[in-house]
Image (cartoon, helix red, strand yellow):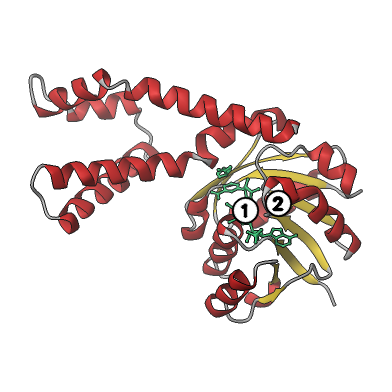
Amino acid sequence: MSVPLLLVGGGRMGEALLGGMLAAGRPAQDFAVAEVSAARRAALTATYPGVQVVEQPVAAEGVVLATKPNDIAAVAAAAAQAGAQRLLSVAAGITAAAIEAAAPLPVIRAMPNTPALVGAGVTAIAPGAHAGEDDLAWAEAILGAVGVVVRVKEAQLDAVTGVSGSGPAYVFLIAEALSDAGVLAGLPRDLANTLAFQTLLGSAQLLIDGDSPANLRAAVTSPGGTTAAGLRELERGGVRSAFLEAVMAATERSRELGSR
Ligand SMILES: NC(=O)C1=CN([C@@H]2O[C@H](COP(=O)(O)OP(=O)(O)OC[C@H]3O[C@@H](n4cnc5c(N)ncnc54)[C@H](OP(=O)(O)O)[C@@H]3O)[C@@H](O)[C@H]2O)C=CC1
Ligand SMILES: O=C(O)[C@@H]1CCC=N1
């Protein structure tokens, strides 16, 4: 009997998707994970009781490809061999055409991010040449359980990767730096962490509620006050330009991964 959804690759992104879907209420029996690392298999088995954790792909209606980009073509071929009906790849860079060349199945490409684990992910999806509306709806149902899903053109996925696929890492770096700065200014680490992390959460919520970043920033910046003094240093340090360069570098790296 085939399982509804097989995840191939139970690493950081595979686990974020699995954990997020389970937390959203999907039953463990809906999932299998194929993972080559014995240590990862043991960890997944302990964390997600009821999920079938195996070394090789098993028969599944749909398969999420969540291995490293270099392994995707081989894994797609193995999943097709094991009876998959359609594929959802989360790999950076690897084109739908490359996956279709390895496995003659409908392919959806997706770029999720790790906040999927807490139901707060954002994923962009794009169809391959043989994927139809039903395949897109299938991918949306999977990924919609763990956050917001947007449809894009495949050519936009490299930029999506640079912004939101890699984006959580930029935010975690800001969180680290803001907390470190609090410690430098004399606060204990626990308190600095609480202040920094809750500031990120609350600020994100204000943005999601719809006001623009520029308006929200102006509302914090009293004339001649503390924030203006702080922002002057961030601009002097080239923070805005550093973000532009970071996203462009990540976008370019995604393109490179797809052209090898
Ligand atoms: N991490 C992230 O935030 C995001 C990642 N992605 C994409 O997700 C994919 C996975 O990334 P990530 O989770 O970070 O990587 P990881 O290395 O954490 O996870 C990949 C896992 O797949 C295993 N694996 C390798 N080959 C096979 C195989 N043939 N069958 C089953 N399992 C296999 C790896 O084992 P081993 O290490 O032993 O090889 C590893 O445990 C990448 O393509 C990446 O581009 C997309 C969006 C965000
Ligand atoms: O760093 C990477 O290549 C992957 C893709 C997006 C986030 N992590």
Quarter-of-image position of residue 80: bottom right
Looking at mark 2, is its residue's CB closer than 8 Å to ligand 1? no
Is residue 26 visible in the rendered image? The answer is no
Q: Disc 2 and disc 1: Cα gap in Å?
A: 6 Å
Where's ligand 1: which quadrant? bottom right
Q: Secondary structure at mark 1?
A: helix
Q: Relative to residue 211, is residue 120 drawn left or right?
A: right
Give the x, y percent position of residue 171: 38, 41
Q: Relative to residue 87, is residue 104 drawn left or right?
A: right
Q: Secondary structure at mark 2?
A: helix
Q: Residue placed at 54% from the left, 62% from the top?
A: 20
201 lies above or below 240: below
Q: Residue placed at 72% from the left, 32% from the top?
A: 154
Q: Which residue is mark 1?
A: 143
Q: Residues within 10 Å of mark 2 (few under 14, many from 20)?
A: many
Quarter-of-image position of residue 98: top right
Task: Kindly check if marks 2 and 1 are in contact, taking CB atoms under 8 A apart as contact.
Answer: yes
Q: Relative to residue 224, is residue 251 drawn left or right?
A: right
Q: Relative to residue 22, is residue 256 drawn left or right?
A: right
Tag shown at residue 122? none
47 lies above or below 119: below
Q: Which residue is mark 2?
A: 139
Residue flagged by tag 2: what amino acid is it?
Answer: Ala
Give the x, y percent position of residue 250: 55, 31
